[in-house]
Image (spheres, grey):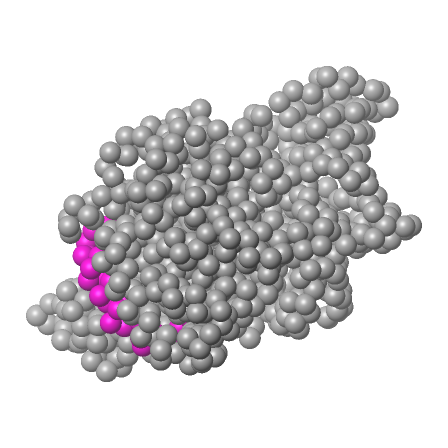
């Protein structure tokens, strides 16, 4: 189906003004379809337009009382002719439930056979479950009715009222864009509360009742704290009535900011011990989605090139508010280690783009830009902007922007105008420097005969100004922090030239890449563990990781630094992030697998022996150790909960699956053991882990590959787990026949799936450990083939970037 272009959207927004939607859903059919009637009232200035409809069957269309021929539907669009000034359009369709995370998703809980449904209507998805004018700048109030099985409950953007057995009405909403209209219907377990006049609610599958009940107070506390913080910052209070956070199965993202009915992946409900990093991440996700009530839901971008006005703001606010207002701390450390590292890689890839691009992609291509630029880089730029302007001016401008455009749409120019009215100056140049460009400046500290000079090297002529700190650290890790504005290519820093370690942007205040000087690199093994600030340690590690990625640092030196310092690291975020990086990029990627794996094993085994029993750090270390150890007897002992389990370590169901996965990859367990573990855990989560383990099994490769490439009915979580389990550097000989098949078969997955899951799957099933220059040509051809869906091409382009770097690193340091 053709994608909506910005020119088409602008014309339709000029031609039409929406009055209201009335959506009637009938979910009583137990099969894979449901019915919906969409009644839309709107005005028109011309006599022609179209409405977006992607049905299984189009039953009827009626415009101003006149029946239209359903056969006119073509390519997801139904043409409208003879429009009047005032119009009423009524469309009755049969729609198909989705399993790929877009539209109205239907999921059967493996634990008890109960059925759950929920709507996901982001880019191009809304017409998959109700007919609409699908673009962000055509807003309207919604009233929704739902018929469903009597034992179900219904939630949505408006407060839900049960009017009869199996019949529900959702109250009329404020004006909403199509992409965050949502219902959730099923036998959900509900927990209600109230705070500051706002009705609150949590919901989940019945089989996850216990973990939700256990964490309800924590979740409500984060919700209350966040509302307090946002109400202090913003002139408008929360404006969408009730506030439900619904934990849903088989979600293709972390969460979605539907006003009044936020949907959250139920992966965030922990069935076993979780790390503090995981709980902090969950808290931040909730804070992020709440920020969208103002940035995105109250004021929405006009077109997807300004999605940063949604996502960058929510990302920045999530870390800021979580740090300032919630019980979870270390949020900016997490940002540096996880989110910023993601964005730094994206900004140095062939698919990089400005935070607020001038180029106007169509709706389908815009989906690709929900990436490390729109989230992490945009958030870092906003953090820099707030530091540059000062909070008073920044928040005054933000509030003026929200007030001027409430329940409407706005773009970058309108936002900058409100900041300027609030007292900011020079922002036109600032936005050109920061928002309209790609790439990172590089900062280096030079030790001169008389002191230290900080240098800025730019990838273009933008000459971005940076408000930041430079940290100097002596042999004991004691800091000397210098604040400065870097608005020229070189500036002197008030630091001694003989200080052990120099870290530009030590407090991670701006968006740059850093190259550490040779003296600093030589001193890191002894000084890094003594630096108390975990965010500074993250800045250092990002410099090390980036230099390794670009071939400026020998990967063996980076690996040795990890082995030397990880024993002293007290941040579970750091341990998890660094181990993930090593296993995804270094071990079996930049370096030979067995040689580098052994270094990681030894370091984690030593740390595990010294970790506090029962601590989050112990669990994070144990997970990393399990993923790399070859000690089959030890792993089997842990599964049997024998004496070999470290004191205090809870071998819960999630860790059991991780242990079994490692045993399968070592060919020390197979189908009998997978079946036995599945018998212990017959949940939907268990089914996902079964899929992962079977894909990891040497005997299961062909079946796993076939499911990924040809099965349209596999759920999102099973699909992604299958792809994640497939490749491993220790199985290079086994997976070699599939490397070439990737390039010929992945494009076909667009025939059986749509939306975000296409790129998510392709990102996971690229042959990441096949470091072979002979694959460059095939990757280039596929990434440039415009007959292939853009999300798949983007994933292949990212893979090509990684392949080229890995080939060069191996050439340079072999």
Residue 545 placement (x, y as % from top left): 28, 58
Query: Is the N terminus in the top left, top right, bottom left or bottom right quadrant?
Result: top right
Q: Taking 1 as reference, is 798 above or below it?
A: below
Q: Taking 428 as reference, is 327 above or below it?
A: below
Q: Which residues are magenta?
A: 547-573
Magenta stretch: includes residue 549: yes
Front-most of residues 74 and 303? 74
Front-most of residues 596 and 169? 596
Residue at 61% across / 28% down in the picture? 11
- Overall secondary structure of the magenta section: helix
Q: How many marks?
A: 0
Residue 186 placement (x, y as % from top left): 76, 51
Residue at 83% across / 20% down in the picture? 67
Residue at 83% across / 53% down in the picture? 151
Residue 114 placement (x, y as % from top left): 73, 51
Residue 481 in sight from this viewpoint: no
Q: Taking 295 as reference, is 6 above or below it?
A: above
Magenta stretch: includes residue 739: no
Residue at 29% across / 70% down in the picture? 603
Residue 720 placement (x, y as % from top left): 50, 46
């Amino acid at each position: 189906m053709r994608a909506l272009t910005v020119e088409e959207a602008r014309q339709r927004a000029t031609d039409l003004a929406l009055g209201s939607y009335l959506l009637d859903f009938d979910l009583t059919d137990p099969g894979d379809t449901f019915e919906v009637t969409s009644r839309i009232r709107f005005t028109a200035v011309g006599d022609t337009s179209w409405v977006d409809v992607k049905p299984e069957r189009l039953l009827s269309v009626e415009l101003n009382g006149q029946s239209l021929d359903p056969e006119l539907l073509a390519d997801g669009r139904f043409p409208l002719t003879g429009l009047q000034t005032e119009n009423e359009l009524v469309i009755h369709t049969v729609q198909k439930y989705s399993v790929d995370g877009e539209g109205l998703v239907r999921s059967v809980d493996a634990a008890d056979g109960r059925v759950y449904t929920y709507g996901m209507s982001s880019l191009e998805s809304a017409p998959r479950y109700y007919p609409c004018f699908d673009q962000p700048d055509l807003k309207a109030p919604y009233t929704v009715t739902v018929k469903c099985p009597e034992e179900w409950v219904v939630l949505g953007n408006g407060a839900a009222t049960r009017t009869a057995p199996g019949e529900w009405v959702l109250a009329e909403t404020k004006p909403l864009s199509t992409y965050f209209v949502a219902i959730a219907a099923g036998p959900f377990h509900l927990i209600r509360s109230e705070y500051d006049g706002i009705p609150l609610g949590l919901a989940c599958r019945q089989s996850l009742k216990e973990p939700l009940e256990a964490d309800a107070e924590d979740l409500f506390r984060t919700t209350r704290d966040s509302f307090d913080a946002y109400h202090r910052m913003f002139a408008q209070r929360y404006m969408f009535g009730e506030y439900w956070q619904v934990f849903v199965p088989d979600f293709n993202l972390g969460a979605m900011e539907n006003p009044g009915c936020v949907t959250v992946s139920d992966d965030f409900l922990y069935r076993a011990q979780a790390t503090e990093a995981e709980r902090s991440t969950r808290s931040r996700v909730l804070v992020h989605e709440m920020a969208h009530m103002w940035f995105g839901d109250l004021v929405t971008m006009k077109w997807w090139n300004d999605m940063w006005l949604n996502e960058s703001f929510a990302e920045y606010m999530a870390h800021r508010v979580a740090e300032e207002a919630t019980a979870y701390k270390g949020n900016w450390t997490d940002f540096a280690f996880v989110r910023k590292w993601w964005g730094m890689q994206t900004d140095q890839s062939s698919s990089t783009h400005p935070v607020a691009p001038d180029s106007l992609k169509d709706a389908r291509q815009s989906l690709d830009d929900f990436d490390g630029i729109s989230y992490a880089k945009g958030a870092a730029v906003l953090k820099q902007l707030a530091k540059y302007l000062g909070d008073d001016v920044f928040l005054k401008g933000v509030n003026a922007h929200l007030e001027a455009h409430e329940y409407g749409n706005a773009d970058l120019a309108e936002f900058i105008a409100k900041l300027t009215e609030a007292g900011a100056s020079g922002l036109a140049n600032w936005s050109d420097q920061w928002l309209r460009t790609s790439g990172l400046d590089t900062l280096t500290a030079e030790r001169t005969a008389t002191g230290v000079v900080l240098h800025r090297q730019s990838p273009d002529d933008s000459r971005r100004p940076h408000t930041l700190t430079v940290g100097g650290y002596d042999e004991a890790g004691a800091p000397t922090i210098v604040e400065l504005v870097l608005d020229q290519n070189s500036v002197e820093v008030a630091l001694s030239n003989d200080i052990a370690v120099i870290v530009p942007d030590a407090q991670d205040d701006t968006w740059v890449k850093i190259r550490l000087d040779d003296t600093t690199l030589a001193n890191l093994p002894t000084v890094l563990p003594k630096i108390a600030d975990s965010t500074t340690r993250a800045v250092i590690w990002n410099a090390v990781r980036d230099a390794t990625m670009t071939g400026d640092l020998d990967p063996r030196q980076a690996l040795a630094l990890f082995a030397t310092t990880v024993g002293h690291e007290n941040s579970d975020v750091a341990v998890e992030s660094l181990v993930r990086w090593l296993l995804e990029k270094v071990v079996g990627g930049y370096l030979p697998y067995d040689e580098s794996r052994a270094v990681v094993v030894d370091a984690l085994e030593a740390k595990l022996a010294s970790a506090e029993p029962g601590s989050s750090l112990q669990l994070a270390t144990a997970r990393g150790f399990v993923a790399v150890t070859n000690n089959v007897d030890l792993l089997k002992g842990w599964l049997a909960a024998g004496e070999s389990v470290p004191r205090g370590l809870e071998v819960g169901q999630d860790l059991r699956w991780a242990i079994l996965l490692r045993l399968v990859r070592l060919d020390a367990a197979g189908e009998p053991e997978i079946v036995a573990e599945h018998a212990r855990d017959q949940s939907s989560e268990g089914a996902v882990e079964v899929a992962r383990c079977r894909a990891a099994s040497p005997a299961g490769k062909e079946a796993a590959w076939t499911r990924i490439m040809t099965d349209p009915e596999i759920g999102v979580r099973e699909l992604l787990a299958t792809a994640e389990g497939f490749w491993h550097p220790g199985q290079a000989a086994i997976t070699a026949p599939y490397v070439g098949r990737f390039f010929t078969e992945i494009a076909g997955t667009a025939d059986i799936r749509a939306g975000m899951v296409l790129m998510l799957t392709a990102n996971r099933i690229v042959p990441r450990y096949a470091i072979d220059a002979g694959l460059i040509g095939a990757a280039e051809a596929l990434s440039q083939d415009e007959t292939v869906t853009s999300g798949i091409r983007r994933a292949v382009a990212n893979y090509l970037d990684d392949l080229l770097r890995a080939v060069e690193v191996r050439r340079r340091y072999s």
